[in-house]
Image (cartoon, rainbow, N blue to C red):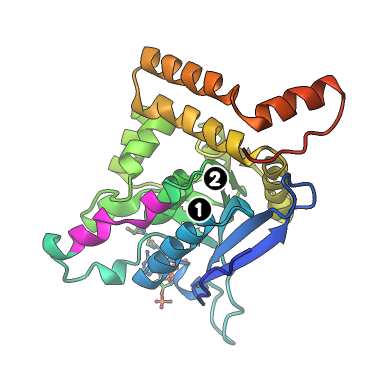
Amino acid sequence: MSDPVESNVLLIENVPSQASSPSGGVVSVWTINRPDKLNALNSEVNSALKSACAWAEADDSVRVIVITGAVPNEPPEGKRAKPNSFVAGADISEFEGKSSTEIRPIFEDNVWEYVWNLSKPTIAMIDGFALGGGSEIALSCDLRLATPRSKFGTPEINLGLIPGGGGTQRLCRLLGYGRAMEMVLSGEMIGGEEANRIGLINHLVDEDSLREKTMEIAQNLATKSPHTIRIAKAAVRTALEQPFSAGIQSERDLFCELFDTEDMAIGVKAFLNRETAEWTGA
Ligand code: COA
């Protein structure tokens, strides 16, 4: 596999997937690493994340991407520990003094779209604050796992702002208009259990089991055909863009096209022969 671009603010660990097919696949775990600033997204993190997305998209061995936040450092003596965070938002210090002309290019070529546009499955592994741009990173992933002590919110309203990384739209699609409106207008945080109850996350998991459960899901996805999984992701995404009847038509087109792939022939044959499918990715 090719080497990802190294960065102190984004640690990349490639965990081999023993059961991946084709073999040699990895689950790429990305840790946003600014724990003293609650992993806030400054321009350095954004740039590292964009490079990582380009690398992951181009490297066939990357099968699944997990995004998480670094755990707090030990506090200096006499100081309180920083709280656990996934990402506590865009770095607010980079907002000060900026005009719309300066901010627009940053938000037009934004990190949330890079994550959203990955064709491979993405999982947000959340233990702590997922606020503002951090909640939007989580919303840009396909799946979200979080601990009960996690806190989600779009507090931009308290800064005289609104979400700018797709939060208003993705929250509406995921939770429905009513809950999205309340979150955006109130800026209030909701805890992990409530997030699970309303469907903001896929799984609520205790701190001790978060990584294990996340990796179990990621490793399972790495065993699927990489081609079919990309098509499956694209098919589900169609529901966000198209009216219902057009979405049904689009699904049918994709389904039929899969009949011309090697992996469909392999998968069907393996089932009938009671064997494990060895995908080619074609
Ligand atoms: N941008 C820049 N710095 C941030 C940040 C952000 N979004 N969120 C937290 N930090 C920094 C704090 O400035 C502080 O830095 P310092 O220790 O150098 O002063 C450090 O992270 C710890 O945060 P602190 O506020 O002291 O922790 P807390 O436990 O008192 O409060 C929060 C935690 C999450 C409630 C609080 O940090 C917060 O409200 N953050 C901003 C959330 C937000 O509005 N996000 C949307 C941005 S668009």
Q: Where residue 91 appears, x then y in whole percent?
A: 35, 67
Q: Is residue 279 left or right of residue 178?
A: right
- Circle number at residue 120: 2
Which residue is more in the foreground, 266 or 87?
A: 266
Give residue 160's quadrant in the image: bottom left
Q: Is mark 1 within 8 Å of ligand 1?
A: no
Q: Can you tell which mark lies on residue 57?
A: 1
Q: With respect to residue 19, does 265 lie above or below?
A: above
Where is the C terminus found, in terms of image quarters?
top right
Q: Does 104 sit left or right of 279 as displayed?
A: left
Which residue is located at x 73 percent, y 28 percent? 267
Helix, strand or loop at label 2? It is loop
Q: Please provide percent x and percent y for residue 69.
A: 54, 62
What's the magenta region?
Answer: 103-114
Q: Earlier in the sequence, mark 2 or mark 1?
A: 1
Q: Residue furthest bottom?
A: 77
Q: Are marks 2 and 1 in contact (CB under 8 Å)?
A: yes
Residue 30 drawn at (x, y percent): 57, 62
Ligand 1 occupies quarter = bottom left
- In this view, the residue farthest toward the top is 245
**Amino acid type of disc 2?**
Lys
Mark 2 surroundings within 10 Å by alpha-carbon count, few (fewer than 14), some (14 through 19), many (20 or more): many
Distance between mark 2 and mark 1 Cα atoms: 7 Å
Task: Look at the numbered disc 1 and give the secondary structure of its residue.
Answer: helix
